[in-house]
Image: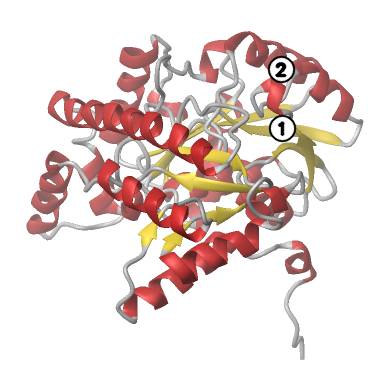
Amino acid sequence: MHSHPASRLANIAPFHVMELLARAKALESQGRDIIHMEVGEPDFPTPPPIVAAAQAHIASGRVFYTPALGLPELRESISAFYQTRYGVSVPASRIAITAGASGALLLALACLAEPASEWLLTDPGYPCNSNFVRSFEGVPVCIPVETNNNYQPTLSDIKRYWTNRTAGALFASPANPTGTLLDDPTLRDIVGYIRQRGGQLIVDEIYHGLTYKRDAMTALQFGDDIFVVQSFSKYFNMTGWRLGWLVVPERFTRDVEKLAQNLFISPSTPAQHAALAAFRPETIEILEQRRHEFCRRRDYLLPELEKLGFIVRAKPEGAFYIYADCSAIARDSQELAHRLLETVGVALTPGLDFGAQAPQSHVRLAYTSSIGTLSEAVSRMRVALGKG
């Protein structure tokens, strides 16, 4: 009898932030007041027009499967969104609705990753990406990205790490955990080089819409041979609905459809009907107000953290994270995270989740709480760190 897990699981690490969250929830159940700065989830409720659309659909009772690639009218709405927001033409036929961005990443890598093929990722970066690659027997190759390049890869990085075993690359802009953007000229050069080498590029754009000072431009402006991952979770405030999408190059659409049919059957029907209201003008107006509030929170929290002794080497331009060097105030970020949680009820994420590049000296803080709550978190940390 086969009594042990598949060998691929040996190299798949736990998602540490979720374990920290479990401890924070356990403390809350004991009556402790916990300020959550650890999980990448907007605190705002789902906008009312989206909720109303879901309620109306569920009330009809006709909650059946949709096509594997999603509701045709939702795919058309996303196509129109690309034209309106970016001025880029993306046919609905190339849009697959998925079970969150995670479902989109799984479909893309199930479609592309061969056993032993190498995939370039960033370090620091979103921890699940390496595990998605490993799940399809690919090999993640993590590029240490530098603060002087805004924690983003450069063309010279790609050239340095590309070998005859490299199948492609997966990058994010804005990035998690750093909130930094890949600038357009660099992305254009990277797209051109990967195309020249016969590789495939996947760009994670799930934090689009949540950028400050300058808007992020989709990678799709540089060609229709790029896979783009998007989500209703972050900008649209729909984390628990588990809905995202994948823009697929034309020649892969049938392959992605076959995978979706077999792996998921179809995305959540109520969530898709809810998302039909996500692009309405009244919904976008709500979301833009919330974007401005995230910007206010970032601008409040950043200098306050620096006063406490954290060092922020690259200012976040998007998402809702600050990736900070904590080496001036603690020897180990994991110990610091657990100490702050247990002693003053502030939950933040140690760098261990985000790669091998000095994780012990970095933490990620999410500004997904009101400024009043962030101020309370700063006060508590000040006490815990002996700063007054």
Pointer 1 with pointer 2, Cβ within 8 A: yes
Residue, x 29% and y 35% (percent of image)? 74
In terms of depth relative to the viewer, which is nearer, 272 or 21? 21
Mark 1 sits on what residue? 169
- Whole-percent x, y for residue 244 in the image: 40, 42
Horizontally, residue 264 falls left or right of residue 272, namely right
Q: Which mark is residue 7?
A: none
Q: Is residue 116 visible?
A: yes
Residue, x 56% and y 60% (percent of image)? 337
Give SS at disc 2.
Answer: helix
Residues under labels 1 and 2: Cα distance? 10 Å
Q: Amino acid at mark 2?
A: Ile
**Which is nearer the N-term, disc 1 or disc 2?**
1
Mark 2 sits on what residue? 190
- Whole-percent x, y for residue 150 in the image: 64, 24
Residue, x 13% and y 27% (percent of image)? 282
Quadrant for residue 142, please give it: top right
- Whole-percent x, y for residue 104 in the image: 51, 43
Q: Amino acid at mark 1?
A: Ala
Horizontally, residue 193 falls left or right of residue 35, namely right
Residue, x 75% and y 88% (percent of image)? 3
In this rendering, is residue 193 above or below 247? above
In terms of depth relative to the viewer, which is nearer, 272 or 39? 39
Q: Residues within 10 Å of mark 2 (few under 14, many from 20)?
A: many
Q: Is residue 248 visible?
A: no
Quarter of the picture holding the N terminus = bottom right
- Whole-percent x, y for residue 305 in the image: 49, 40
Quadrant for residue 225, please give it: top right
